[in-house]
Image (cartoon, rainbow, N blue to C red):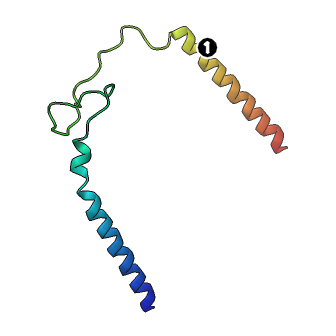
């Protein structure tokens, strides 16, 4: 029993020490030079995402109504085939 507590304490101490050692690196990592093809950093570092900046509405629908109806019919047919196969397998 005392060995388990000692191992837990040692593991906690090692974890704490490694966290403290790595926390000092975070500021230097953030200031490193970025590759040339990387996107530029934002000037405003507020940390909030632009929630209200929505993309413009589409002028035409993503799927034409005829294509959508065809896809729906194919899905209905596939569902019917699957239920028939399950019914035959259950017999």
Q: Between 39 and 45, which is closer to the camera in this rendering?
A: 39
Q: Residues within 10 Å of mark 1 (few under 14, many from 20)?
A: few
Image point 75% across, 28% down: which residue? 81
Residue, far bottom? 2
Q: Between 68 and 35, which is closer to the camera in this rendering?
A: 35
Badge count:
1
- Helix, strand or loop at disc 1? helix
Q: In which quadrant is the C terminus drawn?
A: top right
Image point 82% across, 41% down: which residue? 89
**Quarter of the image where one finds residue 60:** top left
The residue under label 1 is 70
**Quarter of the image where one finds residue 12:** bottom left
Image point 45% across, 91% down: which residue? 1
| Left or right for 78, reference 53 | right
Q: Is residue 14 above or below residue 50?
A: below
Q: Between 89 and 30, which is closer to the camera in this rendering?
A: 30
Residue 57 at what x, y percent from top left?
Answer: 32, 15
| Left or right for 58, reference 23 | right
Image point 26% across, 46% down: which residue? 29
Q: Is residue 69 above or below residue 43?
A: above
| Left or right for 66, reference 12 | right
| Left or right for 79, reference 8 | right
Residue 90 at what x, y percent from top left?
Answer: 81, 44
Residue 8 at what x, y percent from top left?
Answer: 40, 79
**Quarter of the image where one finds residue 30:** top left
Q: Is residue 3 above or below residue 44?
A: below
């Amino acid at each position: 029993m005392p060995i388990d507590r000692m191992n837990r304490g040692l593991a906690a101490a090692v974890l704490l020490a490694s966290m403290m050692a790595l926390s000092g690196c975070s500021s230097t990592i953030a200031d490193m030079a970025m590759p040339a093809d990387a996107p530029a950093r934002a000037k405003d570092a507020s940390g909030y995402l632009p929630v209200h900046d929505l993309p413009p509405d589409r002028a035409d629908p993503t799927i034409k109504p005829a294509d959508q109806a065809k896809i729906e019919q194919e899905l209905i047919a596939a569902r019917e085939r699957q239920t028939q196969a399950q019914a035959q397998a259950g017999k």
